[in-house]
Image (spheres, rainbow, N blue to C red):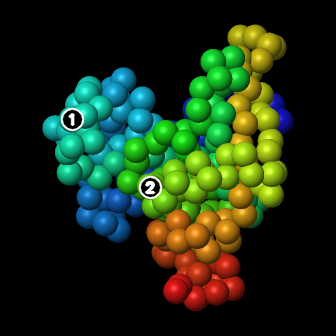
Amino acid sequence: MLRNFDECLVIGDVGEAWTKEYYKLVAGEDLYKADTEAYRSIDVDFVNDEYCAAFDNVDDILNSNVIKIEVKTDSYKSGNQCIEVLANSNKNSLGWSLYTEADYIVSVFTSLDKVYIYDGKKLKEFATRIQHDNRFKYVRTKTKGTYSDGVLYESAVRLVPRKVLYEEGIIKAVVRMSDFEEISPLEEFGVMYS
């Protein structure tokens, strides 16, 4: 699978804009872009405190009481969640799911008109358990740059059915992207919340 880096950024912007609007309208929370090296090192996009959004020390971030949110956006039409286990094969760097410190992962699927909100800590624990688990398909993706036909880097994901994430207690909510309405587990997975 080959992806274009710049196209991924545009799709990511859509997911981030939706997340900010959702938290404002539904949760009554303003979100602030957490765009420092420290936040990037723990894979967090937003926090709910403007002052803390400027922190550039990981310990300060982790010792604060802010809500930390990471946004992932995809345009695929699949019943699977991509759990990144290798971010960059050139650097042999861990995938986001293995090092994020986000409280919530907001996974936006534009083509499905759905957003899955995951418990970040539980997802990280699950990703650590399944990173070498061959029950879940292992897929390598190549990302190319804008000005080059060459591959910038390769990543690797485990494809995990979202129903498995539901059964693991990782899914906090499923929301329709177009109207911010929560979708019931019965509608989404054929089961009731436990």
Residue at point 74% right, 26% down?
154
**Residue designated by label 1:** 60
Q: Is residue 22 left or right of residue 142?
A: left
Is the residue 53 above or below the residue 67 in the image? Answer: above
User: Does the rendering let one see residue 17?
Assistant: no
- Label 1: few (<14), some (14–19) or many (≥20) C-alpha neighbours in 10 Å: few
Tell which of 138 and 44 is nearer to you.
138
- Label 2: few (<14), some (14–19) or many (≥20) C-alpha neighbours in 10 Å: some
Which quarter shows the N terminus?
Answer: top right
Tell which of 165 and 114 is nearer to you.
165
Residue at point 71% right, 11% down?
147
Q: Is residue 22 left or right of residue 27?
A: right
Quadrant of the image occupied by residue 51: top left
Under circle 2, the secondary element is helix
Under circle 1, the secondary element is helix
Labelled disc at residue 27: none
Position of residue 61 measured from the top left corner of the image (x, y, whole percent): 25, 38
Tell which circle, 1 or 2, labels the residue nearer the N-terminal end: 1
Position of residue 121 measured from the top left corner of the image (x, y, whole percent): 44, 55
Q: Amino acid at mark 1?
A: Asp
Residue at point 31% right, 59% down?
24
Q: Amino acid at mark 2?
A: Lys
Tell which of 73 and 37 is nearer to you.
37
**CA separation, marks 1 and 2?**
18 Å
User: Does the rendering let one see residue 12?
Assistant: yes
Position of residue 86 measured from the top left corner of the image (x, y, whole percent): 66, 33
**Residue designated by label 2:** 121
Quadrant of the image occupied by residue 151: top right
